[in-house]
Image (spheres, coloured by chain):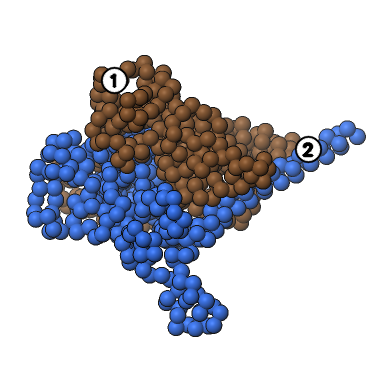
Amino acid sequence: MSGISLRAKRIVKNRAFLALCLLSTSATILILALLIASIMAQGSHFLFNSDALGAVFAHGELSQLTKIIRWDFLTNFASRFPEKAGIYAAVIGSMWVCAICALLALPLGIGTAIYLEEFAPKNRWTALIDFNIRNLAGVPSIVYGILGLTAFTRMFGLFGSDKNSALSFGPDNAWWHIQFPFGQGLLAGGLTLMLVVLPIVIISSREALRAVPSSLRQASLAIGATQWQTASKITLPAAIPSILTGAILAMSRAMGEAAPLLVLGIPVFIANTPDNLNDNFTVLPFQIFNWAGRPQESFHQLAASAIVVLLIVLICFNGVAVYLRQKLRKPLA
Amino acid sequence: MSALSAKAASSAVELARKGVARSRHVRDGWEFAIRGLLGCTALISIAITVGIIAILLRETVAFIQLPEIELTDFLFGTTWSPLLGAEKHFGIWPLICGTFLVSVVAAITAIPLGLITAIYMSEYATARKRAILKPIIEILAGVPTVVYGFFALLVITPALQGACNFLFGAPIFSGYNAGAAGIAVGIMILPIVASLSEDAMQSVPRSLREGAYALGSTKFDVSVKVVTPAALSGIMASCFLAITRAIGETMVVALAAGGLAHMTLNPADQVQTMTAYMVQIFLGDAPAFGVENLSSYAVAMVLFLVTLLLSIIGNILLNRFREVYE
């Protein structure tokens, strides 16, 4: 009798726990829904043209279809007047700085991963490098900003100050103009973001390489291929889908970072797009930060609209990553 | 053997043939160069760490050596008022207190929710439900932190104020407060707790579960009394790494937590965290060179050391967990 009641108690407990699980899981989903809904609610004003929306959906005037989106918001520069403000400079700046970051971080990160997985002897030194990388991933991004400020924006004061550089090449407006120190230019921003995402790229690339079955490597080495030939022709091609997935996720992290660039002192208002690697730029997250921090309601709406654009870009990034993971990954061994 | 490994073998044969054709000497030289180059890229990560420590140390020492600063005051003082003209005080504790408060609220939000979600995904959910849940958690992880800042300032704070107005007849929460910022940071770190803990639970061997089921355990018994203890060091590692992120989080607290550094543990009050102070300085509220500017480096040093310590503990726990099961 008591055995049965004990069993019943445990079954009830199990049910109750399952209910708790469902509750907390749905809370997680609810939070995401609330996040998206609140941003859409605030952001719709500057993204959509309510007249055109009404015309299309209430009266079926399809000619108004392209006017639904307020393209001005995407093509205008930032402004004191909310109705005239746009995110053009921020979008272009974000794209440039991410591209530079990717060009720097991916070769370095993947190179490090290849060295650690394929070449490095398992000794105390490589263990130290490994440990170091894992802990670098936990360093707050604002601290990387300080490193970037000193090493790239001011270059330790070696070439004069960042406002008055002592060493530069080319005329100021040429696309190949470059100056030392880098100041608040694209190159300083890209390098700083590289510092932030490098540990992430290394860790995800290493995991991708580790997932390649060692039988492939052994087959290659046994026939007389060198370590580099094995790594470049056998292991890397097999791991590249997962490496790319990790790389894209790291780039979306870079796309969303504002703190390290804020430390560099990048401007908020900027009325031109960068001409060269030393030109000033601003990024979308920083623009959002600035708008959201203002007291006026309409700037909050601008911030929400910019968030919608940023999230759409990131969702595209993630979509590509998921696609790569699903389509390119072949079963190995 | 699969098609791919057959392909691997055939291309290796081809490579070997090329290798024989080329002089072995040249090939070894090439190999050596590549190895050196890749080794150099690996050293960059060490250089980054050394760079961070060197810069922070240099500026922190310069800060401490300033005539108006006393080391004991910095390390033990409870007043932080660097921008108040004549009455400047540099005692780090109010900033640590603010950071602690936000992180505790974040941990209280994220850890229970994250752990239960992890248990559900690992033990209860069917493959199909997992396939829906996992991307949702990944989306939460991919949202930029500035978005959570916006959410904290313009959604969570009004919601908390509204709730308090309804319950107690007064808003209680101020326009900037540690509670809303903490909740937003908690949502931000929830995916870290959930996915790392789920990974840990997934790598607990099936045999342990099957043993427990064979003895008549319910799913609750298996997941709470067998899998969770077996994955404990992995779960703890996830919590440590998540809290590390919470402490270093910048944009959320800069937007929503306020700018007043004082000793309080009341989540309805505004607080200033270490990162928020750095934002305040670097946004240009203080002259570019001088005591305020240097103080931000000293704060960064403290922040770096705290996060480094937590991250080292987290990684040691993670390594221990991996050693047991992999």
Q: Tell me which residue sits at (40%, 32%) in the image.
A: B274
- For the N terminus of chain A, the image quarter is top right
Residue denoted by label 2: A10
Per the image, label 2 sits on a secondary structure element best described as: helix
Direction from residue A204 to residue B43 in the image, left or right? left
Q: Tell me which residue sits at (44%, 83%) in the image.
A: A63
Report the front residue among B160 and A135: B160
Per the image, label 1 sits on a secondary structure element best described as: loop
Residue A113 can be seen, yes or no = no
Chain identifier, blue in the render: A
Q: Nearer the viewer, mark 1 or mark 2?
A: 1
Tell me the colour chain B is drawn in. Answer: brown
Q: Chain of mark 1?
A: B
Query: Which numbered dot is residue B242?
Result: none
Q: Residue furthest top?
A: B72
State which quadrant residue B79 falls in. top left
State which quadrant residue A37 falls in. bottom right
The amino acid type of the residue labelled 2 equals Arg
Residue A258 can be seen, yes or no = yes
Residue denoted by label 1: B68
Distance, label 1 to label 2, CA atoms, is: 66 Å
